[in-house]
Image: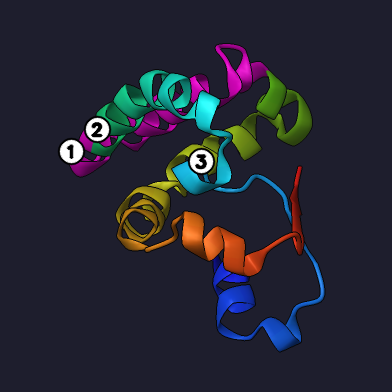
Amino acid sequence: MVALQLALDHPELVGELVLIEPPLIDPLLPPQDRAPVAAAIGPALGAAMGAAAQNDLRTAFDTVLAALCGPQYRSVIESALGRAGLERAESDCGYCFSGEMPSLVAWHFDEELVSRVGGSFSMC
C-alpha cells in the first residue's frame, strides 16, 4: 500500500515495484476473480474484525489466516517459526486489525490509479 502510494505521488522516484503479498483490493484483482475473492474472504474479514474488537486476537488471527492461507496454516507457521513464533504472531496481531485493515479500507485506490501506476509493478 505504501509503495503503491509512493509510485502515485512520486513516480519519478519509482522505477519498478514488486508487490509481495499485495492487499486483496479489487483494482489489483482480475475482474473475474473479484466476486469469488470477496465471497471467500469478506465474511472471514468481518468475523475477524468483530473478534478483534472484542480483544479476541487469537480468534481474529485464526479466522484471517485460515481464510487466506488454508486450514493448515498453524502447522506451517509453527514449523517455520516454532511454537513461540506462532504465539507471538497471535499476540502481536492487534495492530493489523486496529490500524492496518481500517487504513486499507479508507485508502482510495481504483482502476484509474492502477492505470497511472501502469506497467511499473508486478505481483508475487
Q: Secondary structure at mark 1?
A: loop
Three-letter code, disc 2: Ala
Q: Amino acid at mark 3?
A: Leu
Q: Main secondary structure of the magenta part?
A: helix
Q: Could you say whether the residue bearing mark 3 is in a helix, strand or loop?
A: loop
Report x, y in % for residue 107. Answer: 37, 63
Please determine whether, in this image, residue 84 is positioned above or below residue 8: above
Identify the residue at image location x=41%, y=57%: 100
Q: Which residue is mark 1?
A: 54
Please determine whether, in this image, residue 12 is positioned above or below residue 70.
below
The residue range painted magenta reads 50-75
Q: Residue at position x 51%, y 65% from top?
A: 113
Label 1 is placed on what type of residue? Gln
Label 2 sits on a secondary structure element that is helix
Which residue is situated farthest in the left direction here?
54
Badge 3 vs badge 2, beta-carbon distance below 8 Å: no
Quickly name the residue at label 2. Answer: 51
Q: Is 24 on the left-hand or right-hand side of 56?
A: right
* Mark 3 to mark 2 CA distance (whole Å): 21 Å
Q: Nearer the viewer, mark 3 or mark 2?
A: 3
Q: Is residue 25 visible?
A: no
Name the outermost residue toward the top: 71
Q: Quadrant of residue 58?
A: top left
Sequence-wise, the earlier of marks 3 and 2 is 3
Binning the other alpha carbons within 10 Å of mark 3 as few (below 14), some (14 to 19) or many (20 upward) gives: few
Q: Are marks 1 and 2 in contact (CB under 8 Å)?
A: yes
Check residue 24 in the rendering and tell me which mark sits there, or answer none: 3
**Residue placed at 75% from the left, 78% from the top?**
14
Visible residue check, residue 69:
yes
Image check: 97 left or right of 14? left
**Residue 69 included in the magenta stretch of the image:** yes
